Amino acid sequence: MQTAPSVDLTNCDREPIHIPGSIQPHGCLLACDQAVTTVRFFSANAPEMLGAPGIVQGSYVTEFLGDEVIHDIRNAIAAAPEANRAAVIAHLRLPNGKYFDVAVHRQKQGAIIEFEPSLRRTQPLQLAREMIGRIKDINDVDLLISASAKLVRTVLGYDRVMIYRFEEDGSGRVASEAKREDLESFLGQYFPATDIPQQARILYMQNPIRVISDARGLRVNLEPELEEREAPLDLSFAHLRSVSPIHCEYLRNMGVSASMSISLILDNRLWGLIACHHYAPKTLTMSERIAAEMFGEFFSLHLLALKQKRKLDVANEARRSLDRFLQAASLHTDLDDILTAALPEFQALFACDGVGLWINGRWTSIGSTPPKGAEDELIRFISSVADGRIWSTKRLSEDYPPASAYFEDVSGVMAVPLSQLPRDYLFFFRKERLQTLDWAGNPEKTYETGPLGDRLTPRKSFALWKETVQRQATPWRDSDFEIAEAIRSATVEIVLRHNELMQEERSKSDVRQRMLNEELNHRVKNILAVIKSLIAAPSQDEVPIDTYIGSLRGRVQALSHAHDQLTRGGGGGTLHDLLEAELLPYRASQSSIEIHGAPVTLDARAHAVAALVIHELCTNAAKYGALSRDGGALNVAWEEVDDGDCILRWRESGGPVVGPVGRKGFGTALIERSIPYDLGGTSNLDYRPDGLNAEFRLPGRFLTWEDEPAAVEPTVAANLTPEAALTSLAGLPVLLVEDQVLIAMDAEMMLADAGMDNVVTASSSTDALNRLKTFTPSIAILDINLGRDTSVPVAEELLRRGIPFVFATGYDDRSVVPDELLSIPVVRKPYDSNALMKALSDRLTASTAAQ
């Protein structure tokens, strides 16, 4: 007889919460095929809510939603193809006369459409701007966290709002709270890591907004139930996804009736949550959720910038102290004596109870340290696990059992290697700290047999439970690691100084360090300035609200990605990749960006210097130059010269008229001086009226060129256009039939980048046929479905005239295309420049061959 598996804390981690087979009842759901043609699954309340009692599996969605609504939904999917960025259509009127907010996203199984009743047309952008405006000027991390909890509660009306931060072990602590006066406070309390299972943490990363309207756990099943159970529908990205019964019970045990969470993601890690509780059922509108999601993304970026600035300030303070140490060390020649004499100064840099020095096989210590004779084995252990890097622990006796003999004196250790060879270390020690943690209930969960079988049961008591933590030191914080890294840099520098005895190099190092500190501070300010500029909204007449929301999301995501690429690239890299990373945040604009040159790799030193210079050039172009307004153009090209050097040319045009250059700021000085000073190259900046022309020379000793350089194709608007397509398509007249103005503008820009400036655009088949009376294109691009119309009449006319064309579509519905046209190539939307140019080039080649 097989024994039933035991129940433990990992059972929560195995609950398939992403395929619950049901949704929450405040909306309804349709799961369709990829083309949004037929119904695969539907929520049991969909027939009544949508006024379509005849909905069954296999129903055609146009029968109850109409052609116009389905056309809008298909276009929305084409404009937002990523599942984690659902397309949103606000206040959409359905054929039943009712208004709904609609969210739609695509997945491998098909498209999922969610409908929620819309009582009024709201403006999520205005709400998000007001929320962001209240925190954008806050320059303190603690104040930002405190003020944001109050702001979210005031705007969204929840009874309690907490900002909940995760610790290293996965547990969480309530760092900020805003609540009704009559409620008990959770501020400062800890919640065990097991309260949030692993699969829930994954969903928090994938879907940053989670709303639970009613903790009673009311569920609406997906139909047909039997087929859904056999092939469960993945609802990971669905707003209406029903809630785990365990989590609903957890909320009810706390007295909570409704909740919402906003994920706070820093450096691609789940840093915490903005957790909202309400003590009566509560449903947020889709517009309010969009505003909350945008606020959460801005909060995360703003918090990251402030944390980096705080680290910089701490490191600068430590650096000033280390500078005094370096000045004193420059007068001595014995490295052991220098470091031994400096132990009290090292101990004063941050909170610790003792310091030890192991150098050249000799041990020296002050304060609370391991007992005499125990240091040899401890050092051997740390050398085996540290691998030459800074290593730390707050529970030494767990990592190294022999330390149990002296855990009261030493429970926390941070080991800092003193040279590139992992043999000499500086140790910082912390004593045991008896702590009393306030847990929101006993963190030891129990289990019982219930309607779902043996499973874990959430805590039923939320009275404070005290846990005394033994054999553990105060945790090492980020600021401690920043100081440790500064100490390591300083000590390695001492070793180099005393080995090389180069006074000139010492002076250069000091200057370089000051410039780096200024640049880091400058960059933090620039990041905040770019974020602030991204949220500046155009007037309602210029850009539709939904378009602006999508653009803002894309720009914030691009900025985050570019920043992540730069902060991780400290070991050298290619010049092409560096330019792509820096220019990525500006690809969303209407400016033309072109980069090209032979493949070349920069070593770590040249890469770091070039990154600073290119970042300043990009920032200045976005503030004052070609990237500051639509229509501007930037061309970046580089080549190898005879002696192996690299000539990099930066050309801007089409921006504001450049006036006389006044007093030069830090950024301009950095552009002009960094390459000559640090690399021995040259910099030449020419501020012409039509834009900046700059030329830089990077010495060949820092570069690696490919033995047989292959031409790097130009990158235009983030897409590499094949050279063959550019040659064959440039200058040709084109007819573009597209009923969506934004998609048409995007295609026009791609065509213009390929040299096809003579583009005639029509929004309907009638308009296109009229234009063909006076315009003869060399090739045409036809959107198959034009809403109330199709492009088939235009295709037949072009076929009669012998003019080649391609079809375009955002979905796989070609049922309206006659049999004689089924062989015409199809380009998928949203357009990709490579695919579009290749399709046009291939079509022209095939047409020429057939003649």
Image (spheres, rainbow, N blue to C red):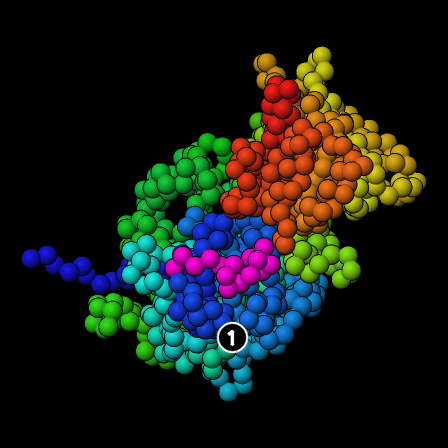
Q: Which residue corresponds to the image point at 50% horizontal and 64% vertical from the top-left?
A: 64
Q: Quadrant of residue 792?
A: top right
Task: Determine if the magenta segment contains residue 156.
Answer: no
Horizontal placement of 16 versus 619: left or right? left
Magenta segment, which residues?
A: 57-71
Residue 327 appears anywhere in the view: no
Task: Reply above or below: 212 against 68.
Answer: below
Pinpoint residue 583: horizontal percent, then vertical percent.
68, 39
Q: Amino acid at mark 1?
A: Thr
- In the rendered view, tell whether residue 347 sits above or below residue 651: below
Q: Is residue 736 above or below residue 574?
A: below
Image coordinates for residue 776, horizontal then vertical, percent: 76, 32
Q: Residue at x 46, y 31 (%)?
A: 421
Q: Position of residue 475 (x, y in %)?
A: 44, 58
Residue 115 shows up from this direction: yes
Find residue 603 and report its image quarter.
top right
- In the rendered view, does 298 fall on the left or right side of 683? left
